[in-house]
Image: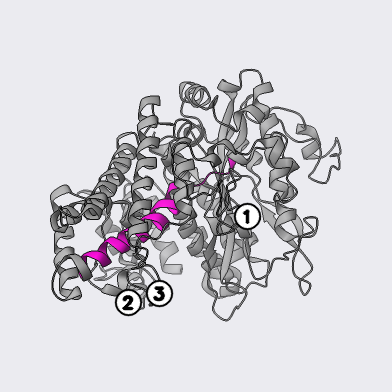
């Protein structure tokens, strides 16, 4: 520490009169510090040690080394004195008290952070825990901060331009949710009200020796009109997270942990729609005029701009367990958007354009009058419509429907279509897929698909291909190619499978072609919906043919695909699929793991929010400097 300080003081006093380039002056500075040149730096040895013991990735090692070398160059050139680095190096009394490092580091942040502090609130947890203080980063507060303090982020992640906002609302005037929306009563809504999505899901966060820290349910929001260049970290914003094993689950939403959270979130979203700072808290208690909240009460949040919840995103498990929507396997009604049944005249299994369920779409009034509807406070907002619940293409198609179809196609190929040993047949197919990847430069690929266990399951179960969403997404072309190569054209069912795979590929091509559009153009949307309908009708015929062999399982996710295709003229399926939300989950998993250690139940989210706030500011500052 002393040697470091001496070297810095000498470097600060040096003038640019030193001869030679930057590297030569850097070496000269090192000689002045202690009389000779070190062959290995202390930082290099530390980085190599951390890498060797698996505590740091080589990519992170490179980033830190690069930043350190840039600092050294700036120091020698007289462009920096590294006081902020010196301050950070001194935390915990220069490392002598490791348990003080965390608090000291947060106090040593050498810049003003304009991201608002997460709001503390009391939530009820399981009986052994009682009421615990939690921290929620309220959407309306972050929305205002982005507008006032981070204009570059506002332009990329919230509202790129007024024309894009006007286009969105022009497209969505026919959306089923629009007729019941509060925005219809807002003057110039098409220029001021920004559509938002809310994503929720469980993320694994494993803490050593902590049985309660296995899965954390997190919530985040983003603008639906954000620029296509906006990354996950720049545009998907954390609200709150809680561990599933700790929260209290009860029908009484006044006591339910997430019921209490949704009450706070709904309050924040309602003020965001008003575009004003609240004059009272979520319990209805009015702020004192002398308080900071009271002084800004009823003043504009963001220069007249507002936000409205327009899409509620998540997988089907999240919809059922967290939002208490119908279980997707229920015979009495599996769908949150219509009143279809598991069987009978209104069955979801009817994929025809004239299917009776198409005339049974929920209206907001009918849904509110339904005695079995979800009682989640999230659905109590004025103007709420069940059509804000967005069934997403990722979970319904790639991680559901496609897995079952592709698994059956592969099983049929290796065991019935191609003669010989099934495993050797699979190796042959895998070679064809790899060649397709190479010929068409497929961006996301399976690393291997050479084991039967990749798609075959226990006896009596339908085949189902394992894989990640992006891998499945880009398998449509290879599967069509492979089946076209090996199928028997004289067999009608083989031709039907080929037709299905062709239409499936056409759907994906449409989404790629119009990936930057807010919604599919009217004629394209018609083609998309008709192709989806035709594809499912063909598949239902194939499924009936192979019912004895238990191939080509059709689930309720096939029905959900029809809903998505019918709404594509208002919202591009890419706009509401959960790829970005899932990417956010992976980032929060790493953050959560770093914040579990040394914490009692319920404390992790507070620590996460402190780190997230600083990290978000650094990201935003970097982007603004780049402009």
Q: Give the residue displayed 79% in from the left and 68% down from the top.
A: 130
Check residue 78 in the rendering and tell me which mark sits there, or answer none: none
Residues at discs 1 and 3 in contact (Cβ within 8 Å)? no
Q: Residues within 10 Å of mark 1 (few under 14, many from 20)?
A: some
- Going from the N terminus, do you reach mark 1 or mark 3 first? 1
Magenta stretch: give its range: 388-414
Residue under pointer 2: 52
Residue under pointer 3: 460
Q: CA–CA distance between discs 2 and 3?
A: 47 Å
As drawn, the residue found furthest toward the bottom would be: 209
Label 2, secondary structure: give it: helix
> Residue 83, how many percent across, how many down?
48, 53
Q: Which quarter of the picture shows residue 545?
A: bottom left
Residue under pointer 1: 332
Q: CA–CA distance between discs 2 and 1?
A: 57 Å
Main SS type for the magenta part? helix
What count of labels does the image hold?
A: 3
- Going from the N terminus, do you reach mark 2 or mark 1 first? 2
Image coloring type: one colour
Q: Give the residue displayed 18% in from the left and 52% down from the top.
A: 481
As drawn, the residue found furthest toward the top would be: 187
């Amino acid at each position: 520490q002393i040697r470091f300080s001496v070297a810095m003081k000498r470097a600060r006093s040096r003038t640019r009169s030193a001869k030679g380039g930057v590297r030569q002056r850097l070496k000269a500075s090192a000689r002045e510090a202690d009389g000779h040149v070190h062959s290995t730096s202390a930082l290099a040895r530390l980085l190599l040690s951390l890498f060797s013991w698996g505590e740091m990735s080589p990519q992170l090692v490179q980033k830190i080394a690069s930043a350190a070398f840039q600092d050294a160059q700036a120091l020698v050139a007289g462009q920096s004195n590294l006081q902020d680095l010196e301050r950070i190096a001194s935390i915990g009394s220069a490392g002598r008290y490791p348990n003080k490092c965390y608090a000291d580091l947060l106090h040593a942040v050498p810049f003003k952070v304009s991201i608002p502090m997460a709001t503390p609130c009391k939530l009820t947890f399981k009986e052994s825990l009682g009421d615990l203080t939690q921290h929620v980063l309220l959407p309306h507060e972050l929305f205002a901060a982005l507008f006032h303090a981070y204009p570059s982020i506002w332009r990329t992640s919230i509202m790129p331009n007024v024309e894009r906002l006007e286009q969105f609302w022009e497209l969505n005037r026919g959306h089923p949710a629009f007729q019941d929306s509060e925005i219809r009563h807002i003057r110039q809504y098409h220029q001021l009200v920004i559509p938002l999505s809310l994503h929720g899901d469980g993320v694994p966060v494993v803490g050593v020796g902590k049985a309660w820290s296995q899965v954390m349910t997190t919530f985040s929001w983003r603008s639906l009109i954000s620029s296509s260049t906006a990354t996950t970290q720049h545009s998907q914003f954390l609200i709150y997270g809680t561990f599933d094993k700790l929260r209290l689950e009860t029908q009484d939403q006044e006591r339910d942990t997430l019921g209490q959270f949704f009450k706070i979130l709904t309050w924040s979203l309602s003020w965001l729609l008003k575009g004003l700072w609240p004059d009272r808290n979520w319990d209805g208690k009015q702020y004192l005029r002398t308080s900071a909240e009271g002084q800004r009460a009823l003043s504009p949040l963001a220069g007249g701009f507002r936000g409205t919840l327009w899409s509620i995103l998540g997988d089907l498990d999240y919809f059922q367990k967290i939002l208490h929507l119908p279980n997707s396997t229920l015979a009495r009604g599996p769908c949150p958007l219509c009143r279809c049944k598991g069987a009978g005249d209104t069955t979801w299994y009817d994929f025809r354009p004239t299917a009776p369920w198409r005339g049974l779409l929920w209206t907001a009034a009918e849904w509110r009058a339904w005695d079995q509807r979800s009682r989640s406070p999230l659905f109590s907002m004025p103007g709420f419509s069940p059509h804000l619940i967005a069934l997403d293409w990722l979970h319904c198609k790639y991680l559901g429907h496609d897995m079952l179809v592709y698994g059956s196609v592969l099983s049929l190929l290796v065991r019935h279509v191609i003669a010989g040993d099934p495993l050797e047949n699979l190796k042959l197919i895998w070679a064809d897929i790899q060649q397709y990847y190479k010929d068409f430069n497929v961006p996301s690929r399976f690393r291997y698909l050479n084991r039967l266990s990749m798609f075959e399951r226990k006896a009596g179960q339908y085949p189902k291909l394992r894989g990640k969403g992006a891998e499945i997404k880009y398998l449509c072309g290879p599967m069509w190619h492979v089946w076209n190569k090996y199928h028997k054209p004289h067999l009608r069912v083989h031709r039907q499978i080929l037709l299905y795979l062709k239409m499936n590929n056409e759907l994906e091509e449409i989404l790629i072609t119009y990936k930057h559009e807010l919604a599919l153009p009217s004629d394209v949307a018609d083609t998309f919906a008709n192709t989806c309908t035709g594809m499912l009708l063909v598949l239902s015929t194939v499924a009936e043919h192979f019912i004895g062999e238990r191939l080509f399982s059709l689930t309720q996710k096939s029905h959900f695909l029809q809903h998505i295709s019918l709404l594509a003229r208002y919202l591009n399926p890419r706009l509401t699929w959960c790829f970005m939300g899932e990417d956010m989950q992976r980032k929060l998993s790493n953050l959560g793991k770093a914040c579990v250690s040394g914490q009692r139940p319920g404390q992790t989210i507070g620590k996460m929010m402190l780190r997230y706030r600083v990290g978000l500011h650094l990201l935003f500052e970097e982007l603004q400097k780049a402009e």
